């Protein structure tokens, strides 16, 4: 083994947070080494947003992040905002557009975001080492020593930016948690988030609707999201379900309002205005035919409205406004866009992302117990937390 090469900071993980942290520190004059076991940087960036990278959201606020400490993300998000990142994107001449709910995407390709981050790293003389797994990390005499491949490096600052275990086919692992525990940091139990839910038992019949989507309101506990839901061959997916999955816990029901724009009493009103119609016909006018038929079959209301008691119509209304599913699980880390849980925020400074009890050790991005909504929120956390650590190391 050769003599360790000295750096000011070593960053483990060349994803969104690691790249951000590296170029911020490098452009502050720090000698930075960025290491990743993958053969290329930013692999999750490249597949995000259908290849167009939903790089941030205009509606970033701390209450759209989940954490054991809901206040932790406030400092970093306030100090490096979505508008700061948009300005960086604009400076590189990357065209972008807003889709629904404040989501911002590249007009061209996610490759532009990766190229931008690499250009900023080059401007900061960041050294990037790819294609070799980390073999060992040690700490002594206020210095961290990292061994990878046949090389060693030392630095007074070490940044954990290796993400969580979601999407393992992209190389994701729980390495961040193992390293955190090695240095005495607590880890909040990680679980899949922004992930499809699976159905079993009597609800298997809804899996026969695979491919059918509809705009709904999905609710778990007190949290609700209005977006599209998609039936799959395994259960439920689509933006509304992915969002609610972050709040759902095993054993908890999920309620779906299939007609969220209908006012209470709409069926009895329809009875007065169109007494010869049926619930099946009304559902067919409002929802995809296969879904409408399935719901109508379950409601068992095929008589004309004029021949249906108001009480039965009210019961049907309530059922359609809160159709209760009992998911038996999720599709797991393989299909989860992000991870809830991670390195405990109780052990980190919200200002700098440095470990409170281990000087020079930092954790950023998805490795930390901060998880955003679907729609660019998790990328913004990567940029903001990476910026915060990059300013501190």
Image (tube, helix red, strand yellow):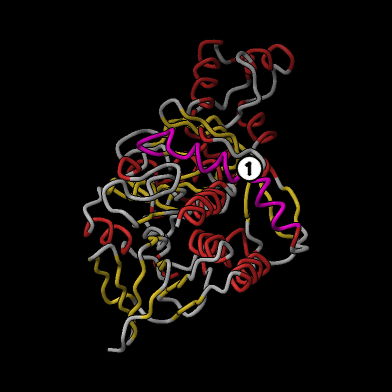
Prevailing SS of the magenta stretch:
helix
- In percent of the image, x 78 and y 59: which residue is there? 95
Write down the quadrant of residue 214 in the picture: top right
Question: Is residue 81 one of those drawn in magenta?
Answer: yes
Residue at point 75%, 59% (across, down)? 91
The quadrant in which the C terminus is found is bottom left
* Residue for badge 1: 289
Q: Is residue 241 visible?
A: yes
Say left or right for 232 vs 214: left
Magenta range = 67-90
The percent position of residue 168, horizontal first and vertical second, equals 39, 66
Up the image or down, 390 lies above or below 285; here it is: below
Q: Is residue 212 left or right of residue 250?
A: right
Q: Position of residue 58 (x, y in %)?
A: 67, 42
Q: Dot 1, how many residues are within 10 Å of its Cα: few (below 14), some (14-19), or many (20+)? A: some
Magenta segment includes 332: no
């Amino acid at each position: 083994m050769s003599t360790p090469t000295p750096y000011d900071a070593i960053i483990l993980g060349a994803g969104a947070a690691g790249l951000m942290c590296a170029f911020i520190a490098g452009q502050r004059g720090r000698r930075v080494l960025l290491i990743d076991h993958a053969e290329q940087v930013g692999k999750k960036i490249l597949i995000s947003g259908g290849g167009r990278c939903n790089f941030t959201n205009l509606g970033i606020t701390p209450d759209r992040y989940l954490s054991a400490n809901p206040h932790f993300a406030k400092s970093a998000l306030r100090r490096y905002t979505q508008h700061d990142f948009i300005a960086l994107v604009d400076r590189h001449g990357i065209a972008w557009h807003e889709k629904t709910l404040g989501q911002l995407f590249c007009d061209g390709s996610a490759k532009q975001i990766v190229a931008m981050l690499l250009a900023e790293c080059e401007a900061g003389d960041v050294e990037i080492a790819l294609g070799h797994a980390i073999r060992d990390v040690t700490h002594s005499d206020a210095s961290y020593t990292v061994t990878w491949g046949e090389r060693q490096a030392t630095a007074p600052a070490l940044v954990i930016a290796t993400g969580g275990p979601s999407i393992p086919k992209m190389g994701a692992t729980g390495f961040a948690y193992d390293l955190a525990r090695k240095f005495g940091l607590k880890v909040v139990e990680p679980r899949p988030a922004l992930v499809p839910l699976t159905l079993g038992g009597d609800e298997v019949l809804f899996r026969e609707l695979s491919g059918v989507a509809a705009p709904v309101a999905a609710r778990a506990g007190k949290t609700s999201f209005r977006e599209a839901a998609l039936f799959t061959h395994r259960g439920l997916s689509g933006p509304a379900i992915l969002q609610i999955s972050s709040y759902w816990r095993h054993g908890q029901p999920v309620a779906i309002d299939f007609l969220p724009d209908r006012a209470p009493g709409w069926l009895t009103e329809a009875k007065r205005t169109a007494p010869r119609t049926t619930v099946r016909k009304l559902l067919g006018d409002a929802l995809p035919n296969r879904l409408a038929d399935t719901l109508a079959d379950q409601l068992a209301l095929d008589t004309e409205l004029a021949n249906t008691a108001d009480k039965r119509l009210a019961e049907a209304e309530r059922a359609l406004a809160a159709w209760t599913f009992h998911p038996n699980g999720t599709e797991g880390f393989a299909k989860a866009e992000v991870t809830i849980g991670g390195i405990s925020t109780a052990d980190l400074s919200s200002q700098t992302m440095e470990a409170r009890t281990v000087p020079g050790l930092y954790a950023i991005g998805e490795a930390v117990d901060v998880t955003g909504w679907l729609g660019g929120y998790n990328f913004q956390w990567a940029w903001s937390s990476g910026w915060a650590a990059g300013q501190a190391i």
